[in-house]
Amino acid sequence: MKKILLTLVLLVSALAYASAQTAYAQLNNHVLTFKYGTMPTSGTNYTVPLNATSMSHVPWYPDRAQVNKVVFDQSFSNVHNIVSLFMWFANMSNLTEIQGIQYLNTSTVVNMMSTFAFTKLSSLNLTSFDTQNVETMQAMFAGSTQLYSLDLSSFVTPNLTNTSYMFSMNAVDPILTTIDMSSMDLSHVVVTDGMFQGNDMLKTVYCNSDCSSSTALTSSSNMFNGCTRIVGGNGTTYDASHIDASYARPDAVGSKGYFTGQAIEPEYIVILLSNPEGAGILTGDGPYNLNDVAQISATANDGYVFADWTVNNVTLSTNAEYSFLVSGDITLTANFQTTEGIGESENNKIKVYPNPINGSNMTVACDEQARVLVYSTDGRCLYDRNVDDTATIDTDNWQGGAYIVIIETKTETKMHKVVKL
């Protein structure tokens, strides 16, 4: 009987704890941070609405002018049932930055109306967004005239029906010149009124959909009104008599349009390997399109130091952070070497002293020609010289911490860890 009671007590406690976990936002020093957990009882905190349909449902809206930055804490990735992002960041007239947006799970979102409308955001990377269930993007970016970079490349929209005023910029001096919608399906869209209206700097719209002959479309007034600089992929320019969806199609010979059709680029895979396995943490692998810039990095685990990136045993870079244009599938290996213990490093041929370094110089002495390299623990090369016998290395600009000294001779390679005090 006691065991049963204990089990019930534990179960009730667990349920109480689970029920205390909630999606909330916290405003502190002009930063609005979204978290999942137990909402604090002190400070400025808001319960996050999961299905907002009106302005009154967004509790931080009255304080919107105080927000300069939005942060999504990693814990917010535990929130899986958001239905609407209606006006979440709308009219945050001082908002310039959003961090951690990859922790915002949008897989169940249906409504993205006015989500980023009228902010001061200059760039938005929304490649983490899942838009498969989204039905409306009405006024999603409207009035955010400082936007110059907008990545919608992950937007797959089989259920989208409303894009009215999505990119409308009826305000002073918008600067967005290019919009890439090539991944989006507009075939089911019903309303596109004012979709690009007032975007007088907009020149190129990449889109493969043909809205001009869509049987679903019922209203498209002023879709391109004021887009005086727009040019289709075949050279068609703005015509004030065609500001509805009649030119909302890829520009082609015999079929004028304002869109630039874009073939879906092949996807290539970047694979990263660690040698030896488990010696470090690698980032930047995965799928890329042709001519994308892959940015990869290697961080050595304890007991190792990064040496170089290689492909088929050919060295590409000795920098732990490396970027390159993707032209096909590629496998890169991050090579690491083990480090020796701290202390005065000496053998029959090589001496490294003093260790630890308590002054301005470190000396590497060897009895034959050698290449001497010094790396910081984050992989930056601080010194690389060929020496005949002795190298005196200026350490004045070194920060306190550990460094790796590599000495390469014709017969061996030695590695030493030194510490700058």
Image (spheres, rainbow, N blue to C red):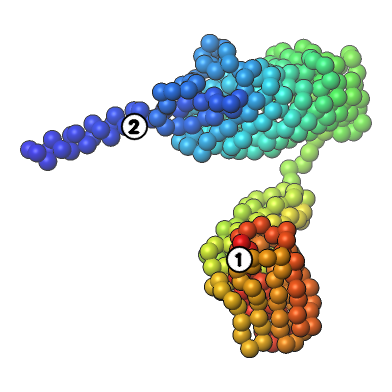
**Residue at the spot of label 2:** 18
Quadrant assignment for the C terminus: bottom right
Residue 419 is tagged as 1
Q: Which amino acid does label 2 sit on?
A: Ala
Seen at 89% across and 15% down, the residue is 240
Quarter of the view holding residue 231: top right
Q: Position of residue 411 (x, y in %)?
A: 69, 87
Q: Is residue 115 visible?
A: no
* Camera-nearest residue between 282 and 44: 44
User: How much space separates mark 2 and mark 1, taking CA atoms?
Assistant: 47 Å
Foreground disc of the pair 2, 1? 1
Seen at 77% across and 12% down, the residue is 221
Q: Is residue 283 above or below residue 45?
A: below
Q: Position of residue 135 (x, y in %)?
A: 59, 23
Seen at 12% across and 41% down, the residue is 3
Q: Which label's residue is closer to the chain start, 2 or 1?
A: 2
* Camera-nearest residue between 30 and 351: 351
